[in-house]
Structure formats: C-alpha cells, structure tokens
Image (cartoon, helix red, strand yellow):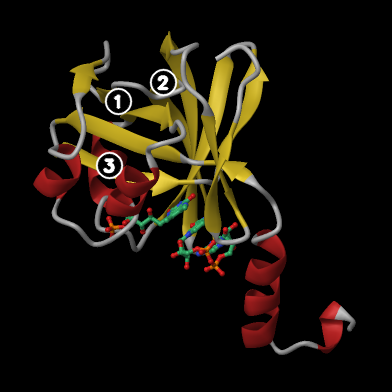
Amino acid sequence: MSLDTLTPAVEKMAFRHAMSRLGAAVNIITTEGPAGRAGFTASAVCSVTDSPPTLLVCLNRSASVYPVFRENMQLCVNTLAAGHEALSTLFGGKTPMTERFSAAEWSTAVTGSPVLSGAVASFDCRITQIVSVGTHDTLFCEVVGIVRNDDTHGLMWFDRGYHPLMRQEA
Ligand SMILES: NC(=O)c1ccc[n+]([C@@H]2O[C@H](COP(=O)([O-])OP(=O)(O)OC[C@H]3O[C@@H](n4cnc5c(N)ncnc54)[C@H](O)[C@@H]3O)[C@@H](O)[C@H]2O)c1
Ligand SMILES: Cc1cc2c(cc1C)N(C[C@H](O)[C@H](O)[C@H](O)COP(=O)(O)O)c1[nH]c(=O)[nH]c(=O)c1N2
C-alpha cells in the first residue's frame, strides 16, 4: 500500500503501527523546580552528541506535565530496569503526581530533579533548546551528571508491551 494514497487519519495509525515495531528503552523523565515536581514515561529519548553530552526527549504539549518541564528547564532521564513495569505504567497514565512518586525511592540530582533508585542509568540535565514539531516539543538536554547502576537488567518497550533485556554481567 502506497503512503500517498492514505488519508491523514489512516496515515497516523499506520505510522503508530509501524512504530510499535521499533523497540526502545523506557524512561521516567522527572523534574523539580520553581514550577513544582513532575514525571512522565517516555520512549522517545535518544542520544544526540557526546560533545557536549546531549540527549533529546520528545514531550507531547498536551500532557499535564508539559508546563512544569517548560518552566523548570531541567530534568532527569531515568532509564528503567527490568521490574519497573508497574512504575512505568503509573507514570504513563493520568495518576496524580504524589501517587506516582510515592511508588518508588528517589534521591536528588544537582539540578534538583528526582533520581530513581535502581534505574539502569540516570542523566541529570539542563534543557538547552526546544524545537516544536507537530504535537510534540523536542527538548534538547545537556547532561550535567550521571548515575549508573551495573547490577540491573534493562527494559524495552516493543510491540506495545514490556520486555526485560538481560545483561550478561548482571
Ligand atoms: N512519542 C510519544 O508521545 C509516545 C510514545 C509511546 C507511547 N505513547 C503513548 O502511549 C500510548 C500507548 O502506546 P503504544 O505503543 O501501546 O501504542 P500506540 O499504537 O498508540 O503507539 C505505537 C507507537 O507509536 C508511537 N507513538 C504513539 N503515540 C505517539 C504520538 N502521539 N506521537 C508520536 N509517536 C507516537 C510510539 O513509538 C509508540 O510506541 C500511546 O497511545 C501514547 O499515548 C506516546
Ligand atoms: C511506554 C510509554 C511510552 C511513552 C508514553 C507512555 C507509555 C506508557 N508517553 C505518554 C506519557 O507517559 C503520558 O501521556 C503521561 O501520563 C503524561 O501525561 P499526563 O501528564 O498524565 O497528561 C509518552 N509521552 C510523550 O510525550 N513522549 C513519549 O516519548 C512517551 N512515551
């Protein structure tokens, strides 16, 4: 089926269906600052450059957390480990923020953002640029601190479900 014969509505669903085949790490993105504390689940996260170390995070502007991230301009990317499936679902739904954070243990990064205990890795970041594309803002995030955990297995989001990813050394 050719893409240019599809109506825009069908094209969006075809895009999502095909995207469900791209496995991705699952992350809880957190922030704390003048606008308060917030966190959400994101799979749209990737490395941009190592000079300076920079990640990007895509955030839907219609999310309730959006104004908090936009005002705080700092965040922590907490990459989830096997066993974090329920926590990921909690931060991916419409659950009140206090309930999301009370389900896990956190420490505080240099920027003030919450760092998830037991995450595979946590990247403490300052947001340096924002580019809007369609429904989402792409947040370019310069990394100012890292916490790594070498004792946990990874977690993938693939085919609309969670899949643990085993590390050989863990
Ligand atoms: N990038 C995102 O914003 C994104 C990514 C994954 C999941 N989600 C949210 O979780 C829900 C469940 O996702 P699912 O994977 O079970 O099924 P789905 O069919 O809704 O999505 C399949 C895939 O399409 C992409 N996608 C989904 N919604 C998107 C959006 N608004 N913008 C850009 N890409 C998008 C993601 O890669 C996702 O894994 C989605 O409906 C969405 O609300 C959003
Ligand atoms: C596995 C998975 C992956 C993602 C999401 C969900 C799930 C379950 N969600 C949706 C996001 O987490 C959800 O909308 C949050 O609850 C934030 O919305 P509210 O703050 O509750 O409005 C999401 N949203 C987003 O803006 N960018 C993303 O990359 C993702 N990725």
Q: Residue at x 77, y 87 (%)?
A: 6
Name the amino acid type tagged 3.
Gly
- Closer to us: mark 3 or mark 1? 1
The residue that disc 3 covers is 39
Residue 80 is left or right of residue 116, and the answer is: right
- Residue 58 lies, in percent from the top left, at 50, 47
Which image quadrant: the N terminus?
bottom right
Depicted 40 relative to depicted 12: above or below: above
- Residue 68 lies, in percent from the top left, at 23, 43
As drawn, the label of residue 122 is 2
Query: Do callouts 3 and 1 mark residues in contact (Cβ within 8 Å)?
Result: no
Residue 70 is left or right of residue 170, and the answer is: left
As drawn, the label of residue 108 is none
Dividing the picture into quarters, in which one does residue 19 lie?
Answer: bottom right
State how far apart marks 3 and 1 are (Cα): 11 Å
Dividing the picture into quarters, in which one does residue 45 lie?
Answer: top right
